[in-house]
Image (cartoon, rainbow, N blue to C red):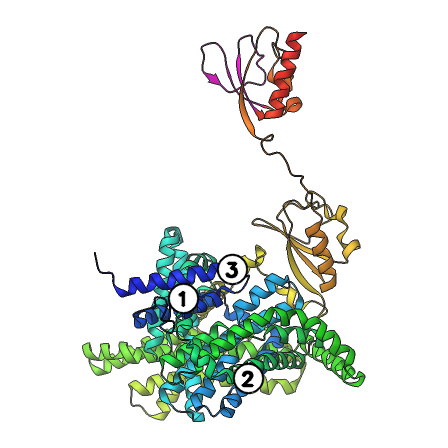
Amino acid sequence: MLHLPTLITDLALILGCAAVMSLLFKKLKQPIVLGYIVAGFLASPHLSFIPSVIDTANIQTWADIGVIFLLFALGLEFSFKKIIKVGGTAIIATITIVFSMMLLGIAVGSAFGWGRMDCIFLGGMIAMSSTTIIYKAFDDLGLQRKQFAGLVFGILILEDVLAVLLMVMLSTMAISNNFEGTEMLESIGKLIFFLILWFVVGIYLIPGLLKRFRKLMNDETLLIFSLALCFSMVVLASNFGYSQAFGAFIMGSILAETIEAESIDRIVKPLKDLFGAIFFVSVGMMVDPSMIITYALPIAVITIVVILGQSFFGTVGVVLAGRPLKMAIQCGFSLTQIGEFAFIIASLGVSLKVTSSFLYPIVVAVSVITIFITPYLIRVAEPVSKWVDNHLPANIKRRMERYTFGTRSVVNQENLWRRLLVPIVRSTIIYSIISISIVALSFRFFVPLLQLHLPNMLASLLSAVVIILLISPFLRSMMVNKLNSHEFITLWQESLTNRAPLLSTIVIRIMIAAGLIIFVITSLFRISVGLLIGLTFGVVVFLLSSHKLKKHSVLIEQKFFQNLRSRDIMDEYLGKKKPEYAGHLLTQDLHLAVFALPLESAWAGKTLKDLRLRQKYDVDVASIIRGRRRLNIPGGSCRLFPQDKIQVIGTDEQLGLFSDDMLHDVILVDNLDYEKREMTLHQLIIDANSIFLGKTLQESNIREKYHCLIAGVKRGNGPLIAPDVDTPFEEGDLVWVVGENKNIHQLVNNKKQEYEK
């Protein structure tokens, strides 16, 4: 008998337990993640009466790969543009929840007398809600189209981003063991620098590569290409001192902006499910039952803290953002659990050996309890909100309504200065980072290479020219961005007091560009101050006046934004995402929802005028998406077809009534005897007494009268031929008829009756 490696026997045990538990938890309608954790518990050495995993080190390696795939898949579902589009409400609520829960977790850990790193990691674990569990709960309860659900999803997007950044910060803190403010600010600055650099370079290069090789990309090559990019970024991030999960998330978020994102997500999903299952099984393997019993009190306290803290701070955060109390309570009650990121952060603490052994099983136990409770808390959110509204003092209720109304008016107010300064700051940061990176890489690799093969003066001169030419398109774009915009011109003409601040925005950007040029020149040459100022002034003037450089910088910028927006444009056209105007409707109660017309819908085939949707439900149909066609602002004569995607504008109540009627107004089909509807092939001989003798196919009305089809006609010894509608049947013709049994029976019986007559 051949000896199997322990890795294979361990995988057999792990996947066998995972398979059984996943089926069981699916049957019980519980999250499969919990089934994997139970499977890990069963496969662990803590249960001696059943086989257990032998080599946990190998399994941990596979679990690390699972984290990479989980974060890569999360990045594919994420887009940096979503941070901007979720709006101020989600940003305010998320910041309130995350930082408040982190402080609460640190306080709870300190109260139990735990170590500093245990407290910090605990705060990070309980600060993040579970995206997977909330998506499933909303789907099971039919709440995806509710207005508060959209806000919850926005909060989850931001929490995922903060969780990834938190992992990087915790890794840095654990490795350096330094908590000084300057060190932390330096680490954050470095992180933001590389984050923007990787994202910008990735968006500029990768969509172009995918587009160039699109004809060569099938599922196999696309899978290998995307995974090569993923693991390359993992290695790159690791070399820069960041976690492997961070690199996987970054590459996933870059690929999320490409048109192929959905295809990549589809083909990567089986790998993510496999390795993700191994990761969650490894989570269960680290749960020691004795630890859970020993630390029952901390588990109970932390569970209560998570439920009360998330619901309270979630409600407070949404109210602070200016949303109604009812919506705030629904959001807060939806976020009362911890999930996959808690496990990942806990695994990070274990791998870095900075957290105590008891913390991992405590967090797993808290997660299991809160995940089970989540659906019930979501259900009671609306009754609780009504109870609070009925018992809230009238003066507090009036103040909250005034605050909500005032916040809305501020949000909807146009601000020219904001619309001018935000793009200027954004472009200045991005182009500065790109330019600094080019300069740093040039001095690291290019300049030493030239100095090795050329005389010093010639090498320095050539290096200066090449580096300045490389960064010149970005410096020019930075200096002139928004200079001729509507906002800049309006503010300039509106008031003389605006001109000094406007000029300062130009001067500051020119000084930044000049500073980079001065750095390059002074690093390569020793020259006088006067000559340095003259050279710098000449380069700046050249950058601003060169038409060729202007064209080049515009093309670079256009390509970047084209790559950045390509998927959004396609998804919006095909109805996979809501149009941009949906976030700027006139009232906060009015929003846009998408409905798919069922196959058996009684509305199919009717025009919008016939359905009278505006009169019945007080809703407006904005667009109809039919396959790859989009009909915007359809008229009353537009007809609906099965599986049309209908984009409808209305309130929660109006859209709910519309949805109920659309889904329930269907054509019911009785239970049929399927054997009677079976299609069969039958031979019919045209004899002297046949009613079809001498008639053409058109005159016989076989299709219309008997609902049968003439498949072929054989005449004499000739071949079987397709029937000709104008050729009459002759005696002896052998006709092949296709139809349902009852219709063919009727056709043959009519012939026999005619024969008997």
Q: Along the line of sight, which residue is nearer the eye, 334 or 328?
A: 334
Callout 3 crowding tier (Cα within 10 Å): few <14, some 14–19, many ≥20: few
The nearer-to-camera label among 2 and 1 is: 2
In the picture, the disc for residue 69 is: 1
Spatial CA distance of label 1 from label 3 is 23 Å
Query: CA separation, marks 2 and 1?
Result: 33 Å
Per the image, the residue denoted by label 3 is 26
On the image, which quarter does residue 496 sit in?
bottom right
Mark closest to the chain's N terminus, 3 or 2: 3
Residue range of the region highlighted in magenta in the rendering:
709-738
Q: Earlier in the sequence, mark 1 or mark 3?
A: 3
In the picture as drawn, the residue positioned furthest to the top comes out as: 688
* Separation (CA) of disc 3 from disc 2: 29 Å
Is the residue 103 above or below the residue 233 in the image? below
One can see residue 481 in this view:
no
Q: Position of residue 457 (x, y in %)?
A: 23, 83
